[in-house]
Amino acid sequence: MVADPHKPEFNGVLVIDKPADVTSHDVVARVRKILHERQVGHFGTLDPFATGVLPVSAGKATRFAQFYLKSRKAYEGTIEFGFSTDTYDATGKPTSEAALVALKAPEIERHFRGFMGRLMQTPPPFSAKRVGGVRAYELARQQKPVNLNPVEVEIYALEMLSFDGRQLRFAVECSGGTYVRSLAHDLGQKVGCGAHLAGLRRTAVAEFRENRAVTLERLQEAAQQGSVDSCLIRLEALLPDCPELVVRGREETSVRHGHAFELAQALRPGRGEAPGHAPAASLLKILGSERRLIAVARHVSGAVYHPNLVLV
């Protein structure tokens, strides 16, 4: 198929404000239709009942998913005490009898803060984890046993925003792979009255934050007005914490061909310090002579890097 020379080319990330009751896959399908772009993906699934930040990649940006698999995430949500559910959230069936809640804010906060730091967390039965090659949620729907192994996650920040005697509003920052639903369920188990996640909104994934989010309706309007670029985070702005290296001439050609290279002496890590005193950057963003991103290189050893991702 010959590319349409008049079709706009979209390469970047859209921070979509995902509405409730749609899947991340549904959002990707909608963005494909709005942009008339087949190459669309996302950086981290968001549960259907949750709202908020869903980074959606378009064009060449879809190849950056590998760098965002374990990204730090932030949420605000509500935990309701009184009974647990099979999904660990408000969409599931109760798995415990409704109990009277006789909890005080200081007691809740003490238990809540006990989840700070690194911990072993068991994913919910209704999750996309695989058990013997089968998705856990498929087994759970068939009411078959779901035995999932605990995994290590990290809670970087955890704050109780309010507590009215039954519902707790909170904010959390956590590592990729953390299930906030499990956090709610485990808190209920700890205080002894059952609990589930009543609401959840994601406010950030890595550098993609709520203040850059656009609704699908706003994106549709921008597409009709020819102003999608105003919603798009360009390739050069991705991985903002990675150092940049500008190459020209033969060096640029070599990088574009995927050849490994060695940093010049003046650019090597540890300049002015004892060898090995400062660790080498694990990733480098490589910009061409026009200061457009042409590659992302991974550290191999010493001062040697290899273009792991080449944007041709």
Image: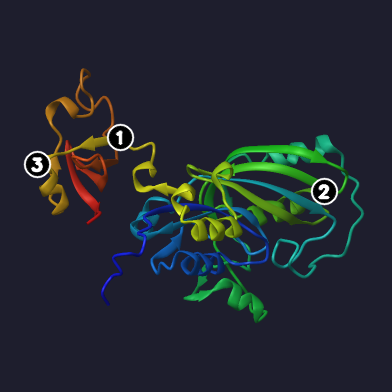
- Rendered image quadrant of residue 265: top left
**Which disc number belongs to residue 66?**
none
Query: Dot 3: within a 10 Å radius of its alpha carbon, few (fewer than 14), some, or many (20 or more) residues?
Result: few
Q: In this rendering, would 70 be left or right of 285?
A: right
**Residue assigned mark 2:** 167
Q: In this rendering, would 4 be left or right of 105?
A: left
Please tell me which of labels 1 and 2 falls first in the chain: 2
- Please name the amino acid that badge 1 sits on: Pro
Q: Does 101 appear above or below 41?
A: above
**Residue assigned mark 3:** 249
Q: Secondary structure at mark 2?
A: strand
Q: Are marks 3 and 2 in contact (CB under 8 Å)?
A: no
**Residue assigned mark 1:** 243
Please tell me which of labels 1 and 3 falls first in the chain: 1
Residue at (59% x, 67% y) in the render? 23
Please tell me which of labels 3 and 2 falls first in the chain: 2
